[in-house]
């Protein structure tokens, strides 16, 4: 099996120990690509001291834009340009969900619901790897609790920007057929996104994303639209979005 690519946007560096506890359940060879927001310099330095002895770690400083989606686009673009080759990608971020006046307990609950089903034990991780190896039609595996379809009340949010991206990227999968992991923490296949990033200038897309903290409940957001598009890319490659 090829090496795993783990991409983490570590905006809240105080959650590193929690994230590292989950990563300890991965008994496979992996590279760790970590993006840090450039407006958290003091916290970033404390974190960098913590990980100075870790191997196979790549650090990126990014502008605070596009929430976790923007940094993923920026980092994945670099990975592709540098010729890295992986089998699977694990996309993570430090989801606290504090923006929009949300209760911290809600964010912690959401984060746990996303992480526990896919990373809470070595058996869980082994089973996910096995599913990818045995079923080539699987594109994304995430938490079933946050597997969103057209029946979800938030399905139509960001419709305007989603349809513009569908046209821009010539996506054939119908919007109403979409399935995506709300919160964008998931395992996925590297090669599908690699091919897509090779065809499209995703840095231009990244540069147009919204800055700071925001929700999508009042108006369409390009950032949240891309959350949906990441799944449509997989579905356009005839890959399934699976919840566990």
Image (tube, rainbow, N blue to C red):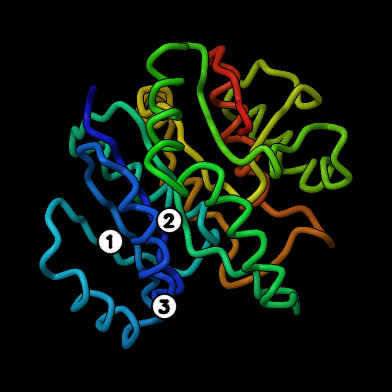
User: Which quadrant of the figure contains the N terminus?
Assistant: top left
Task: Please tell me which of labels 2 and 3 falls first in the chain.
Answer: 3
Numbered tag placed on residue 186 in the rendering: none
Residue 173 placement, left or right of 8: right
Report the residue marked by disc 3: 14
Mark 2 and mark 3: Cα distance apart in space: 18 Å
Task: Please tell me which of labels 1 and 2 falls first in the chain.
Answer: 1
Report the residue marked by disc 2: 71
**Few, some or many residues within 10 Å of mark 1 (<14, 14–19, 20+):** some
Of tags 2 and 3, the one toward the viewer is: 3
Report the residue marked by disc 1: 60
Quadrant in the picture for residue 16: bottom left
Residue, x 55% and y 61% (percent of image)? 67
Task: Please tell me which of labels 1 and 3 falls first in the chain.
Answer: 3
Marks 1 and 2: CB-CB under 8 Å? yes
Of tags 1 and 3, the one toward the viewer is: 3
Element under disc 3: helix
Residue, x 20% and y 56% (percent of image)? 58
User: Which quadrant of the figure contains the C terminus?
Assistant: top right
Residue, x 46% and y 37% (percent of image)? 124
């Amino acid at each position: 099996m090829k090496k795993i690519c783990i991409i983490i946007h570590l905006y809240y560096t105080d959650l590193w120990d929690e994230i590292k506890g989950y990563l300890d359940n991965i008994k496979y060879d992996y590279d760790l690509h970590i993006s840090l927001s450039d407006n958290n310099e003091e916290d970033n330095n404390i974190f960098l001291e913590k990980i100075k002895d870790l191997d196979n770690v790549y650090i990126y400083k990014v502008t605070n834009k596009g929430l976790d989606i923007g940094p993923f686009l920026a980092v994945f673009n670099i990975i592709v340009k540098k010729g890295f080759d992986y089998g699977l990608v694990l996309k993570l971020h430090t989801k606290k969900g504090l923006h929009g006046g949300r209760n911290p307990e809600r964010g912690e609950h959401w984060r746990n619901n996303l992480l526990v089903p896919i990373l809470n034990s070595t058996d869980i991780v082994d089973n996910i790897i096995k599913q990818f190896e045995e079923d080539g039609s699987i594109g994304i595996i995430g938490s079933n609790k946050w597997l969103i379809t057209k029946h979800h009340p938030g399905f139509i949010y960001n419709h305007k920007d989603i349809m513009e991206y569908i046209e821009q990227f010539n996506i054939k999968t119908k919007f109403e057929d979409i399935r995506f992991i709300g919160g964008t923490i998931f395992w996925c296949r590297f090669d599908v996104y690699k091919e897509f990033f090779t065809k499209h200038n995703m840095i231009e897309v990244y540069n147009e994303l919204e800055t700071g903290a925001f929700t999508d409940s009042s108006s369409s957001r390009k950032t949240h639209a891309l959350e949906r598009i990441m799944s449509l890319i997989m579905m356009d490659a005839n890959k399934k979005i699976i919840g566990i």
